[in-house]
Image (cartoon, helix red, strand yellow):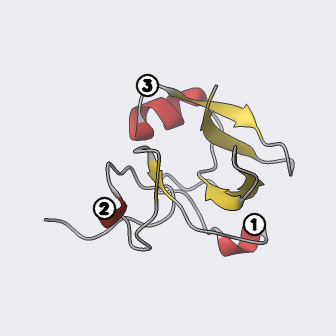
Amino acid sequence: MGCPGTIGSACMTDSDCFGNNCNNGYFCTQACTTNADCGTSPWGVANACETNGLGDKTCFPGCTTTQQCSDNLGADLQCYPALDSSAQICASG
């Protein structure tokens, strides 16, 4: 088994992630308060601290194109404007 993934790395289960937090089988995440808590995606784009569907602040992988999200994390994810900041993030529609 490989090393656990960092924020924005693809995952299937919580144990696939360094912080044991896999977002719905798509990407590793963690709780956050600011973008600085989230680091950079595996493909070099700044991640963003955003409010998820449950109202919790979590790290989402940053992106510049939908292809980055779909190629790295799954066909269901697209690159959307973030709600809490001017970032763009991988998320499902």
Please indicate, yes or no, whether residue 70 appears anywhere in the rendered image: yes
- Residue at 71% across / 33% down in the picture? 80
Residue placed under numbered mark 3 in the picture: 75
Q: Where is residue 69 in the image (x, y as percent from the top left)?
A: 51, 36
The disc labelled 1 sits on which kind of residue? Asn
Of marks 2 and 1, which one's residue comes earlier in the chain?
A: 2
Q: As rendered, which of 38 and 26 lies closer to the eye?
A: 26
Instruction: Inspect the image, locate mark 2, and give the three-letter code of the amino acid beneath it.
Output: Asp
Residue 51 in the figure: left or right of residue 61: right
Left or right: residue 19 versus residue 46 is: left
Task: Please give the name of the residue rendered at 86% of the width and 50% of the height, measured from the top-left corner.
Answer: 84
Residue named by callout 2: 16
Say few, some or many: other residues with alpha carbon within 10 Å of mark 2 (under 14 / 14 to 19 / 20 or more).
many
User: Would you call the spot at circle 1 few (<14 residues within 10 Å), some (14-19), or many (20 or more)?
Assistant: some
- Residue farthest to the left, as pictured: 1
Q: Are marks 2 and 3 in contact (CB under 8 Å)?
A: no
Q: Which residue is drawn at 86% across and 51% down?
A: 85
Secondary structure category for the residue under label 1? helix
In the figure, 70 relative to 15: above or below?
above
